[in-house]
Image: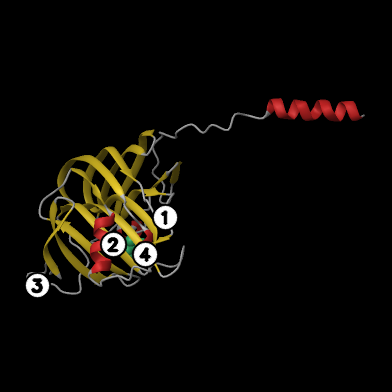
Amino acid sequence: MRFSVVLSLVGAALATPVLEKRLDTSTHCGQWDTVTASPYSLLLDQWGLSDATSGSDCASITSLSGTTIAWTTTFDWVGGTSVKSFTDIELTSGVNVPLSSITSAPSTWKWSISSSGTVVADVAYDLFTSATSGGSNAYEIMIWLANYNSGPISYTYSSSGSAVAIKTGVSLAGYTWSLYYGSNGSNYVYSFLPSSTITSFSGDVNLFLKYLTSNGYISSSQYLTTAQAGVEATSGSATITTSAYSLVINS
Ligand SMILES: *[C@@H]1O[C@H](CO)[C@@H](O)[C@H](O)[C@H]1NC(C)=O
C-alpha cells in the first residue's frame, strides 16, 4: 500500500510537463483577444468596433527576445468617425508604481507602415495613471509617433477644426513636441505630438512623465498603472509592422 503510494508519487513527478511556454505567433482577430508574451501582452482591444460598418483588425507577435518584441497589425475599417481599435503591446511588469519613484523608462520602437488610400490612425504610446495602485484611470498620457489624418483630444479647437496645443516647442528625447490636453469623457488626456513622424524612437519615456509632473500637470503621487504602445485606428487599410519594441520601467 505504502509502496504503491510512493510509486504513484514518483510517476506523477516524472509525468510533470516542462513548464515552458511556446511563443504564440498565430494571427488573432477577436475583439478582445489577448496574447501573453511576458513581460508583454498583445491586446487586440477593438473597443470602438461597433462604430464600423464593416472591417477587421488582426495582429500577431513575430518574435520575442528578452524585452524586445516584434509584432504586426493589419486593420481595414470602413465607416464611422470614431476610433475602432487600439491594438497594442502592454507591459505587464514594473507598473503600478508612483510616478515619483520611477527613475527611468527606456524604450525603443522601430516600425513601418504600408497603407492604401486614406488612413485615419495614429501610432502612439498610451500610458494611464491612477490615484491608487491598480485603481481607475485618472489621466491618460499619449506620446504619438505618427498622426495619419487624426488628431489629439483637446478642450480647444481652432475655427478650422484642428486641436489647439496648450504648449508648443517642447523638447524631449531628442524631438520637438506639441502638448494637447482634453477629456474623452472618462479620463483626462495629455497628448504629445511630434513635429514629424518618428519611425525609430529611442529614448526615456519617463522624460514625458517628468515633464508633466514638474510642470504641475499631473501629481507625482499618481500611480502609473498601464503602459501600452500601439495603433489607434479609425478608418482605412494599413499594416503596421514593429520590427523592435521594448519598454522597461525602472523604479
Ligand atoms: C478614453 O476612454 C477610454 C475609457 O473608456 C480609454 O480606454 C481610452 O483609451 C480613452 N482615450 C482616448 C484617447 O480616446
Q: Is residue 121 visible?
A: no
Q: Which mark is residue 129?
A: 4
Q: Quadrant of the N terminus?
A: top right
Across the whole image, how many numbered discs are drawn on residues?
4
Identify which amino acid the numbered label 3 is placed on.
Answer: Ser
| CA–CA distance in space, label 4 to label 2 | 8 Å
Left/right of residue 146 with respect to residue 26 in the rendered view? left
Looking at the rendered image, the disc whose residue lies closer to the viewer, 3 or 1, is 1
View quadrant of ligand 1: bottom left
Task: Report which residue position mark 2 lands on.
Answer: 141
Q: Residues within 10 Å of mark 1 (few under 14, many from 20)?
A: many
Q: Position of residue 5 (x, y in %)?
A: 85, 30
Q: Earlier in the sequence, mark 4 or mark 2?
A: 4
Identify which amino acid the numbered label 2 is placed on.
Answer: Ile
Identify which amino acid the numbered label 4 is placed on.
Answer: Thr
Q: Which mark is residue 246?
A: none
Q: Residues within 10 Å of mark 2 (few under 14, many from 20)?
A: many
Q: Secondary structure at mark 2?
A: strand
Q: Earlier in the sequence, mark 3 or mark 1?
A: 1
Check if mark 4's residue and mark 2's residue have beta carbons within 8 Å.
yes
